[in-house]
Amino acid sequence: MTDNVHTRLAVLGSGPAGLTAAIYAARAGLQPIVIQGIQPGGQLTTTTDVENYPGFRDVIQGPWLMEEMQAQAEHVGTRMVWDHISEVDFSRRPFRLIGDGGIYTADTLVIATGAQAKWLGLPTEERMKGKGASACATCDGFFYRGKKVAVIGGGNTAVEEALYLTNHSQDVTLIHRRDSLRAEKILQDRLLANPHIRIIWNHEVEEFLSGGEPEALTGLRLKDRLTGATQDIQVDGAFVAIGHKPATELFQGKLKLDDEGYI
Ligand code: NDP
């Protein structure tokens, strides 16, 4: 149990946004604390190869990058706190943050709790994460150069990811559960005009198929939502692009959130 801690500036969240804020705050002499949350380092710690972070010509690892950011933040005077905040009180100042390990008061709070990509929630999808199932085409698309890939979803993200993937693959399949896209018209037009993208309408993914040693994705089992018929398609990479969920449950009723949960 940590003693009650008062700070001029607390940062909630230890991904790149939170640590960047902390580095600047520390260098401004504010002696910030960063409360790490349940996934210290954030979404990048679930990635392996990172090839698009400015300043690194060679491939670096997501967890390593986050360790370096944390070390830099600490080096300039940030205090890292391994705690999870379960309640906040913004009705008075200083703000109160109630954690599993203690109570924190802060004159200023930077909220950098980030978001999580939504997944379909299939057991085979879970097993294939990092082995062919991804939720980020710009992060992982490069690894499928010249291979067959699929994107699941029908919103702007899915269409942008499908278009982006044609930089690497000549064989991109968009799988959507309905017969019309939610994405903006201009993106739909680009998608439909792209000769390297085909669309499978009214289908949902039932299973991620795998094989080989080491195990890798080999395809997807799709179910026609109108007829119930199933078909298998062969792909090397499958990108789930069905939206993101902001990590803002903590602020329900305390801050104004939009319908999607964004502050
Ligand atoms: P959206 O919520 O807009 O779209 C999600 C898509 O995934 C929908 O087509 C939805 O289908 C489908 N979907 C959701 N759940 C499932 C499921 N369980 N199984 C199969 N399909 C599913 O999310 P986006 O991430 O695309 O976009 C989020 C917001 O960000 C939007 O406002 C978007 O406009 C914006 N955005 C803007 C961009 C830009 O301006 N360049 C780029 C990217 C995003 P259905 O349509 O049937 O509901």
Image (cartoon, rainbow, N blue to C red):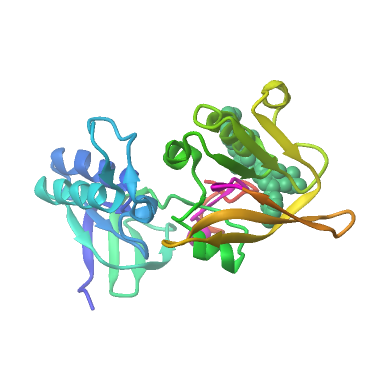
Farthest front residue in view: 212
On screen, residue 110 above or below 221: above
In the depicted view, which residue is nearer to us: 166 or 32? 166
Query: How far from the left and from the top, in percent, is residue 47?
Result: 37, 51
9 relative position to 233: left or right: left
Dividing the picture into quadrants, the one containing residue 221 is bottom right
Could you say which quadrant of the image residue 214 lies in? bottom left
x, y percent for residue 63: 28, 53
Which residue does the image show at 36% across and 61% down from the upper left? 39
Residue at image x 23%, y 45%?
Answer: 22
In this rendering, the answer to whether 11 lies above or below 211 is above
Q: Position of residue 28 (x, y in %)?
A: 16, 38
- Evaluate whether residue 13 shows in this view: no
Indicate yes or no whether the magenta region holds residue 35.
no
Residue at the extreme right: 227
Which quarter of the frame holds ligand 1? top right
Q: Could one spot residue 74 in this view of the protein?
A: yes
Outermost residue toward the bottom? 1
Looking at the picture, tell me which residue is in the foreground, 179 or 41: 179
**Closest to the observer: 155 or 223?**
223
Q: Quadrant of the N terminus?
A: bottom left
Residue 262 falls left or right of residue 229: left
Q: How many marks?
A: 0
Q: Residue at x 44, y 55 (%)?
A: 130
User: Is residue 250 a member of the stretch shown in magenta?
Assistant: yes
Q: Which residues are magenta?
A: 235-251
Residue 237 pos. (x, y %): 54, 47
